[in-house]
Image (tube, coloured by chain):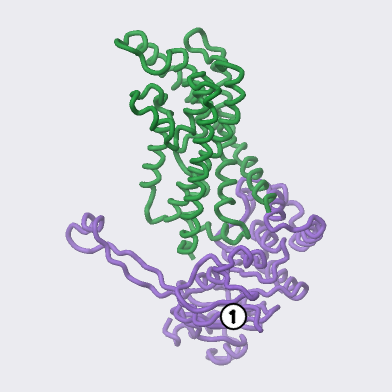
Chain colours: A green, B purple
Amino acid sequence: MRKAYLSIFRIRAAESFQYRIAALSGSLTSFLWAVIEIAAFTVFFKYARGPGGGLTLEQTVSHIWVRELLLFLQPYNIDGDLLGKLTSGDVGVELCRPLDLYWHWFARTSAGKLVVFVMRCLVCFLVAFLLPGGFAARPPASPAGFLLFVPAVLCAFLLCSSFLMLMTAVRTNITWGDGPMYLLGLAGGLLSGGYLPLQLWPGFMQPFLLLQPFAGICDIPARLYIGSMEPSEAWLGIAVQLFWSVVFIAVGRFIMARRVKTLVVQGG
Amino acid sequence: MPQIELSKIRKTFKIYERPEGKWALLRGAFSRTARTVTALDGVSFAIGEGELVGYIGPNGAGKSTTVKVMSGILTPDGGACVINGRTPWKERTAHVAEIGVVFGQRSQLWWDVPVSDSFLLLRDVYNVPRETFKRRHDELTETLGLGGLLKTPARQLSLGQRMRCELAAALLHSPRILFLDEPTIGLDAVSKLALRSFLKEENRRSGVTMLLTTHDMDDVEALCDRVMVIGHGKLLYDGGMPALKARYAAREGEDIDEVIARMYEEMAL
């Protein structure tokens, strides 16, 4: 049975790898955006009065590039194909498969992310190493940090997929429209550290920011890469990621199972 | 015991309506009234193994809703349905493993990848052993003439070609029952005839039970010994095609569409 989900993952990845140009142009957007942000941060760090935040300028620049690398995990939107199927009623065809709808769509959702990673994020990240001086991406802070960064990215992939599936399960109630999804997506983006590194937020918020569900999508792996989280503390970060993945999967499955029972397949 | 048995299946849908009159758009954003529409109003029938049954009725009569209930993708409000010994919506995954469904207006092929990739995916989804799959695949490719189409992405197929591929996709796992919801919609005469002869042959050879909804009465005449008519959510006729013609035809040799139109009129549909 597991083979079926692997096959779905494979076919979805193969399908999305056809859209190379779209992904490459996204890469350029990422690149320009990061350069502008770095310029702004450089100004802030240079002229700021009083004690700095939790990061140095070098760490912040590195954080920005790692964020571009992990941009594919940002939970902006659910899988476009699945949204189309829900609104057009093609979800009926999906339900005619002898598969658990949740894992079926989990495989699809996560596979759809891979192409964005390779074509958009990886390309942008590697090019960033060629930039001059203060703009360039830097190698990881320590070998141990990098060794822990890799599993943290895998956990972030799991966390992001399970959060997107929660959004998909909510969206299964099609008469609600996109509103609740946008709210969830915005909260996720902000709290993942995708807009501002979480360690630059006020000090009293730090314990909350580390333990909340979205830090694991971007900030925790980034901390390990830039060295603002000691390798010896990595277990906590990864435990937070896994904990919230399990929670999202449990809640997503619960909502999905209830929705499927009352789902109305649209159209004749 | 019949393979498919429905008794007193009921399904209603809610339709939300906007209030009328002054400021209706604005008021509609805050309050709305719901109207209940009865799609199925106590439908009962039984179908035995290997039967080929036509299921007809005007638009909005409840044909597709019945097919959805029998496919396990829609939960009815009341009544019982047992297919292959299971209640479809309660044991959905076990149930759908033994049926095939073709929706004429929807596609089950992956849009952007070659047809053969979709077929291979179905092998894994239905867990068909390799040799069994290969035999069945070759057989269907041959009888449906898919040889040249397998490497083409589904989006570049014509409707007739796609429908042949859809049929193969629905039959690759050798289901015991096949539901066809308007399979000939939009097809040209040649494709239609090819589809009909394939269905007839498939039914005869592998004994798969088929239920076919359509608006094309020639489909029903050519294929089905038994025809069921539904209207306003109720089953209005269940029997042979000749008997139906005899009852409603005004004269000998009248066009079948005229006969059906008269029947719908007399039944006040």
Amino acid beneath label 1: Glu
Above or below, B75 against B246 in this view is: above
Q: Provide residue A4's location: percent of width, then percent of height.
A: 67, 51
How many numbered marks does the figure carry? 1
Residue nearest the observer in this picture, A208 or A167: A208
Decide: is B266 above or below A224.
Answer: below
Residue at the extreme left: B22
- Between B252 and B107, the one lying in front of the other is B107
- State left or right for residue A209 relative to residue B105: left
- Given residues B50 and B143, the one toward you in this image is B50
Q: Residue at horizontal 72%, vertical 55%?
A: B123
The chain carrying label 1 is: B
Q: Could one spot residue B93 in this view of the protein?
A: yes
Say if residue B118 shows up in the picture: no
Query: Would you name the residue on which mark 1 appears?
Result: B5
- Of the 4 image quadrants, the one containing the N terminus of chain A is bottom right
Q: Decide: is B182 above or below B255.
A: above
Could you say where residue A90 lies in the image, as x and y percent from the top left? 53, 57
**Residue drawn at the location 80% of the way across and 56% of the way down:** B134
Residue B219, x across and y down, in percent: 62, 74
